[in-house]
Image (tube, rainbow, N blue to C red):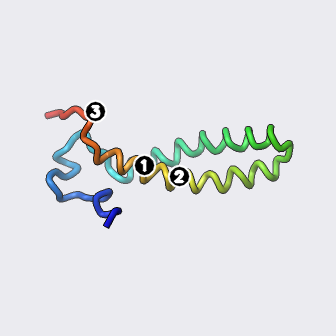
Amino acid sequence: MFVNPLFRKNKLKNFEQDKASETPIRSVLKSFSWRAIGTLDTILISWFVTGKPELALSIGSIELFSKMILYFFHERIWNQVKWGKQKTD
């Protein structure tokens, strides 16, 4: 299944062996912090464009959850890519 490699722990190398890997919980926490900044930006831009703070909050609320989910999976996929990682001993 597509999602299984995103959470692999025992194939080839696990998180403890590969110091360049990132744990899923770290990806989740990064998702929350980045989305807080991104959602505030979306709310402010939406308010500026529409002139309606209620609509801006609605747009920001929807965007908050959709982008957080997308970002988590984006991070997990990129964590599988070996390019650009340096091994540390």
Q: Nearer the viewer, mark 3 or mark 2?
A: 3
Q: Secondary structure at mark 3?
A: loop
Marked residue nearer the N-terminal end (3 or 1): 1
| Dot 2 crowding, Cα within 10 Å, few <14, some 14–19, many 20+ | many
Circle 1: residue type: His
Q: Residue at x 17, y 57 (%)?
A: 11
Circle 2: residue type: Met
Q: Viewed as shown, does residue 56 lie left or right of 8? A: right
In this figure, which residue is indicated by the disc labeled 3? 84
In this figure, which residue is indicated by the disc labeled 1? 74
Q: Secondary structure at mark 2?
A: helix
User: What number of labels is visible?
Assistant: 3
In percent of width and height, residue 49 lies at: 80, 40
CA–CA distance in space, label 3 to label 1: 16 Å
Marking on residue 40: none
From what the image shows, is residue 39 above or below residue 86?
below
Marked residue nearer the N-terminal end (3 or 2): 2
In this figure, which residue is indicated by the disc labeled 2? 68
Q: Viewed as shown, does residue 30 lie left or right of 55? A: left
In percent of width and height, residue 77 lies at: 35, 50
The reply to whether dot 3 and dot 2 touch (C-beta < 8 Å) is: no
Q: Viewed as shown, does residue 88 lie left or right of 59? A: left
Q: Quadrant of the C terminus?
A: top left
